[in-house]
Image (cartoon, grey):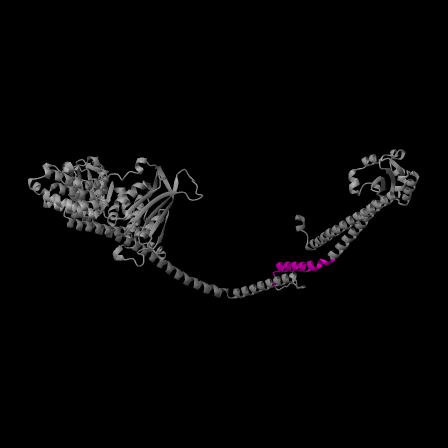
């Protein structure tokens, strides 16, 4: 086939024509030859079969009367058949009865042994190929036929005839010669005709090829190929001529362009110069826009930082003093006002945090910091955080954590808490009855495989509620910034429309997806899936189901000297009030210069004389980072670069919430707390740097019983005289209320009941009742639910003890 590729078109056409003709002739000749052979064979077979039947019929009488001469005369009639070389009649037992031999051919046709003595018919059949008897061969020398002689359904004998195949072979040779001559003549004729006729196709192609060579050699595109037919070859020639027309037209246009090239170059150069000027102007405008955007972004960051500082600084005093007054004040109305102040302050703080978080996310400055996380501890914290809201609205909180979660999950703990607080807070806000359920499961996707040694899983969070639900056409809208569900009563439910938007962005930053499934009036299910979350070491089984650390413990610090550096007086006052019960010696300074002077630093502008001798040893410094003159950053850097001061822990007290500021503080300071700070946050940070002891709070069994609270020593004579009246009031008015409240332990009802008992105790000067009320209120504020239940259960026992004292 490779050689055929290099044939000329004329040779290919002749070769294909010859090949086709030869194949057709060969197939036709073979068919005719085979048909002639089988036709001749079939005729010869029919002729011999008929002849043997005739001989058999004529031999019945000879066999019946045992007349050998008559049988031989019957066989002698075969002399007229030149092809029959032998014939014989045999008795029914197979013995020879009469035989015929062709004269003049015996020596050539039969062996000498068969001439000298005759064989029985059974021996003849054994000497012949059984296949020949059945198939009548084409290429053997002889053709044998056996025919039974039957008379009145009785086999009288057998006729055997042998014919040679010379005539058949002669005819076959003649046929082969004829067919060979016909094929040879046909091949010559086919070659002649194809050589003449191929020109009809090859001539236009060859002329087109010559034309192409001339056009290519002379580069003369005015030459055209001559069209001689209207078939595909004619179409090909028309296409070639059209191509030459297009090339000629192009050359003509190029000639015209050459004539006006200088003018066009000058024109294009002017246009390019103008375009370059426009492009340079655009580049300048884009550069200016970029610089303006960067300036605006810096201004936005500075504004957010300043806003955070300016708002958080007074919020620190508002929330700090509210927390202090709540611990000191027992008046129910005043405590209610303080709680409202604190609640409003926390709401404002949450709004500020949402705005800052949204700005960080949009600026791409919010970083995710995965760390080993005990998810059960986080959920316990969420439950504790919203416990009061659950009790106020009488909602059931359900928690379902998969038993398969036996390892810590590598997630950003702060962002997970923020997401869960947003979703659980929304669920409580929009649910008036029923329950809020938080479920956490881990699972593998179908077909998902472990590709490394690090264990990874997919984590599913579901927050389900039985609230008002969300219409389907609103379920995408609620995740947009500052968007809320249409028709939502803003005064009733509040909110800014940022919580879910931030939740979605935080989820996506953590390689997660959030979706919602909801029906109006049936509640909602928010689903969050985090993919390929790494799993840390196995959790201690006792940690999996334990409560948060510190609930049943108290911190006792050892004496220490602390310096507070803050230019705002009420910020220093809040910290001093928080630490008033601790054995700390506190020194206040209003600015960084004064702090360096007290520390005896040589970098102070006005160092204290003999500072090295007079300077007290401070165990810890609480440093405000944004102060006039010398900032907290500068002062802390001086301290950390001083060999005598660098070991003093410096805790930053900052109102900034920007990521770059936090990173800078972490690199410079030993710790930090963010304004507005709480007492718990401050104590937690101090624990990391100051010596202290942790004492377990007394267990429920160690709490005082009613006998310990009420004794004759605690009852004054005046109160003893009024005991019967007091007991009657308690039994008639308070026991029924107590029985109703003990079933639910709703905080509002508990608080009101404790205030009423306290008021009644103060009216009658009954110390045990007022002490019981204070214990209940204190345990409510600290969320000591286990102790609260026991203390509340003691109320009837106190009445019994009072009755016992009154009877005695």
* Magenta region: 196-221
User: Where is residue 590 drawn, in percent x and y?
Assistant: 16, 46
Q: Say if residue 656 shows up in the picture.
A: no
Residue 407 versus residue 2 in the image, above or below? above
> Which sits in the foreground, 190 or 787?
787
> In the rendered view of the protein, which quadrant contains the C terminus?
top left
Query: Could you tell whether 27 is left or right of 77 in the image?
Result: left
Query: Could you tell whether 522 is left or right of 61 in the image?
Result: left
User: Where is residue 331 drawn, in percent x and y?
Assistant: 14, 48
For this orientation, the residue located farthest to the left is 717
Magenta span dominant secondary structure? helix
Query: Could you tell whether 14 is left or right of 666 in the image?
Result: right
User: Where is residue 403 drawn, in percent x and y?
Assistant: 35, 39
Q: Say if residue 636 shows up in the picture.
A: yes
> Which sits in the foreground, 484 or 55?
55
For this orientation, the residue located farthest to the front is 152
Give the quarter of the image for residue 565: top left
Residue 468 versus residue 688 in the image, above or below? below
> Which sits in the foreground, 724 or 585?
724
Give the quarter of the image for residue 283: bottom left
| The stretch drawn in magenta includes residue 712 | no
Residue 643 versus residue 350 in the image, above or below? above
User: Where is residue 518 drawn, in percent x and y?
Assistant: 35, 53
């Amino acid at each position: 086939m490779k050689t055929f590729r290099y044939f000329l078109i004329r040779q290919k056409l002749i070769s294909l024509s010859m090949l086709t003709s030869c194949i057709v002739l060969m197939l036709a000749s073979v068919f005719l030859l085979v048909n002639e052979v089988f036709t001749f064979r079939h005729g010869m077979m029919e002729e011999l079969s008929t002849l043997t039947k005739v001989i058999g019929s004529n031999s019945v009488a000879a066999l019946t009367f045992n007349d050998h001469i008559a049988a031989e005369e019957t066989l002698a009639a075969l002399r007229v058949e030149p092809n029959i070389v032998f014939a014989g009649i045999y008795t029914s037992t197979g013995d020879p009865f009469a035989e015929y031999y062709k004269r003049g051919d015996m020596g050539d046709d039969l062996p000498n042994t068969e001439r000298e003595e005759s064989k029985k018919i059974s021996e003849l059949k054994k000497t012949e190929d059984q296949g020949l008897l059945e198939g009548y061969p084409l290429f053997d020398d002889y053709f044998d036929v056996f025919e039974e002689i039957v008379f009145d359904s009785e086999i009288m004998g057998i006729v055997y005839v042998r014919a040679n195949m010379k005539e058949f072979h002669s005819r076959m040779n003649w046929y082969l010669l004829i067919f060979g001559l016909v094929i040879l003549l046909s091949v010559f004729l086919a070659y002649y005709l194809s050589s003449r006729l191929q020109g009809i196709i090859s001539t236009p192609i060859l002329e087109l090829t010559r034309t192409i060579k001339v056009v290519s050699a002379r580069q003369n595109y005015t030459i055209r190929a001559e069209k001689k037919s209207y078939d595909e070859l004619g179409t090909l020639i028309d296409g070639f001529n059209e191509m030459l027309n297009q090339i000629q037209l192009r050359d003509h246009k190029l000639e015209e362009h050459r004539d006006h090239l200088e003018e066009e170059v000058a024109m294009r150069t002017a246009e390019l110069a103008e375009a370059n000027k426009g492009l340079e102007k655009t580049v300048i405008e884009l550069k200016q826009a970029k610089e303006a955007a960067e300036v605006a972004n810096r201004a936005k960051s500075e504004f957010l930082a300043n806003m955070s500082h300016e708002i958080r600084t007074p919020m620190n005093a508002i929330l700090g003093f509210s927390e202090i007054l709540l611990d000191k004040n027992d008046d129910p109305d005043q405590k209610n006002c303080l709680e409202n102040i604190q609640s409003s302050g926390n709401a404002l703080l949450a709004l500020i945090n949402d705005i800052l978080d949204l700005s960080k996310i949009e600026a791409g400055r919010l970083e995710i910091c995965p760390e080993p996380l005990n998810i059960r501890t986080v959920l316990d914290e969420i439950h504790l955080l919203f416990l009061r809201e659950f009790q106020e609205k009488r909602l059931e909180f359900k928690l379902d954590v998969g038993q398969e979660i036996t390892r810590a999950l590598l997630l950003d703990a702060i962002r997970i808490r923020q997401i869960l607080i947003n979703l659980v807070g929304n669920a409580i806000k929009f649910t008036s009855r029923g329950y809020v359920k938080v479920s956490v499961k881990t699972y593998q996707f179908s077909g998902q495989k472990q590709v490394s040694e690090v264990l990874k899983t997919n984590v599913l969070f579901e927050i389900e509620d039985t609230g008002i639900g969300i219409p389907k056409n609103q379920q995408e809208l609620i995740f947009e910034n500052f968007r809320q569900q249409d028709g939502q009563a803003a005064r009733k439910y509040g909110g800014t429309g940022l919580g879910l938007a931030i939740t979605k962005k935080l989820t996506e930053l953590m390689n997660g997806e959030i979706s919602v499934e909801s029906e109006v009036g049936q509640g909602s299910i928010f689903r969050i899936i985090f993919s390929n979350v790494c799993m840390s070491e196995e959790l201690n089984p006792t940690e999996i189901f334990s409560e948060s650390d510190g609930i049943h413990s108290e911190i006792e610090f050892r004496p220490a000297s602390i310096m507070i550096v803050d230019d705002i007086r009420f910020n220093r006052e809040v910290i001093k009030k928080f630490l008033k019960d601790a054995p700390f010696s506190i020194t206040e300074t209003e600015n960084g210069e004064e702090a360096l002077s007290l520390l005896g630093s040589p970098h102070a502008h006005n160092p204290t004389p003999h500072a090295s001798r007079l300077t007290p040893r401070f165990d810890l410094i609480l440093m405000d980072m944004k102060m006039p003159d010398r900032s907290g950053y500068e002062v802390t850097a001086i301290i950390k670069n001083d060999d005598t001061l660098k070991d003093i822990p410096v805790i930053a007290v900052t109102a900034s919430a920007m990521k770059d500021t936090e990173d800078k503080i972490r690199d410079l300071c030993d710790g930090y707390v963010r304004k507005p700070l709480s007492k718990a946050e401050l104590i937690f940070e101090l624990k990391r740097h100051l010596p202290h002891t942790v004492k377990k709070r007394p267990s429920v069994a160690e709490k005082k019983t009613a006998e310990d609270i009420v004794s004759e020593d605690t009852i004054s004579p005046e109160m003893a005289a009024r005991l019967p009246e007091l007991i009657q009031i308690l039994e008639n008015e308070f026991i029924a209320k107590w029985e109703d409240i003990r079933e639910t332990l709703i905080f509002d009802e508990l608080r009101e009941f404790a205030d009423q008992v306290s008021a009644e105790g103060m009216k009658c000067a009954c110390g045990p009742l007022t002490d019981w009320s204070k214990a209940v209120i204190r345990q409510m504020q600290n969320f000591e639910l286990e102790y609260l239940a026991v203390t509340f259960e003691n109320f009837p026992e106190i009445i019994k003890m009072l009755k016992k004292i009154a009877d005695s």
